[in-house]
Amino acid sequence: MAVKLIALDIDGTLLDSRWTLPEANRAAIAEATCRGIEVALVTGRRYDFAMPIAVQIAAPLTMIVSNGALIRTEDGKTHLRRLLPRETAARVLEITKPWRDGCGVVFDRPRENQVILEVFATDDPIRSAYYARNKEFLGQAVPLESCLTEDPVQVMLSGKVSAMRDAEAVLRSVQAVERFGVAATVYESRDFAMIDVIHPQCSKGAALAEWAALRGLAREEVMAIGDNHNDLEMLSFAGIPVVMGNCVPELRTFGWHETASNDHNGVAAAIERFALREVAPCG
């Protein structure tokens, strides 16, 4: 069955290890959309942090962002939005107080005050770079709980891998009772990890499945490419799951297809192998 929808993770997958978009990946996506294949960027990034990548690709793209909490098409129309109840967010902030220096609350707002922090941890180079790239979207609230005047998209935590594993263990221990979802992304080589606490029905996989159903597509017509823990549900749903050569070891245990690493145009290679060979070229 021909591929009709390609779901692509961004960081560690579409982008190389320098966080740049390889020309081969850009060209493969453009060719796929030219041949009538829909391409969706499926990412833990919030919408405005994912769009600078999307605009580098000369093709219409569907945006599935914040680990599946929001689906928005190129025309700016929002098709799905699942927010974390503010009472649940307040409970999460209480549970994760030991990691407050790496904690933020994300809202679906036009521009200012999308990401609210209590502490700006400038001693961490990765966080400092994030602050610099996103300063127009950042706000501050002390205490952080005071920002919960509306339902947020998510509560996010970031920090060293060991600290985030501790935080994840605490969150997992109360997850069923408190009714929220947990999505973890780990970069061992950088000793950096992120945890997103989201609506309990949210995941990359759940959003991709819902979008495919709305588009009238069978899972066999969906290809997904990812590299990290938060891609697991998306890859499990797709009829053609592809893991990157640089993926976390867990993803290799499922026997899925493997492509080259993100530094060797793995996305372009997978699109060529599994999607473009089945569809006539443009022109």
Image (spheres, rainbow, N blue to C red):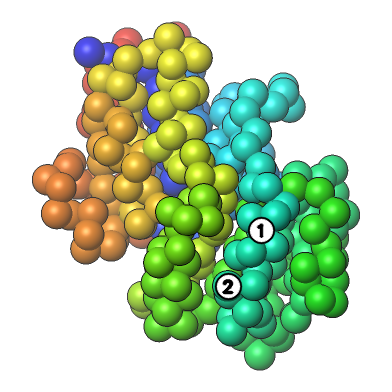
Q: Give the residue displayed 45% in from the left and 63% down from the top.
A: 174
Residue 256, x across and y down, in percent: 17, 42
Q: Give the residue displayed 81% in from the left and 76% down from the top.
A: 143
| Foreground of the two, 261 or 173 | 173
> Badge 1 is on which residue?
89
Q: Which quadrant would the C terminus be assigned to in this image?
A: top left
Q: Give the residue displayed 40% in from the left and 83% down from the top.
A: 162
Residue lying at the far bottom in this picture: please name it: 123
Task: Tell me which amino acid carries mark 1.
Answer: Ala
Task: Tell me which amino acid carries mark 2.
Answer: Ile
> Badge 2 is on which residue?
95
Q: Is residue 156 left or right of residue 204?
A: right
| Foreground of the two, 216 or 151 | 151
Residue 244 against residue 115 in the figure, above or below? above
| Foreground of the two, 13 or 139 | 139
Q: Is residue 66 left or right of residue 238?
A: right
Q: Is residue 177 left or right of residue 99?
A: left
User: Which badge, 2 or 1, comes first in the chain's sequence?
Assistant: 1
| Badge 1 density bin: few <14, some 14–19, many ≥20, Cα 10 Å | many
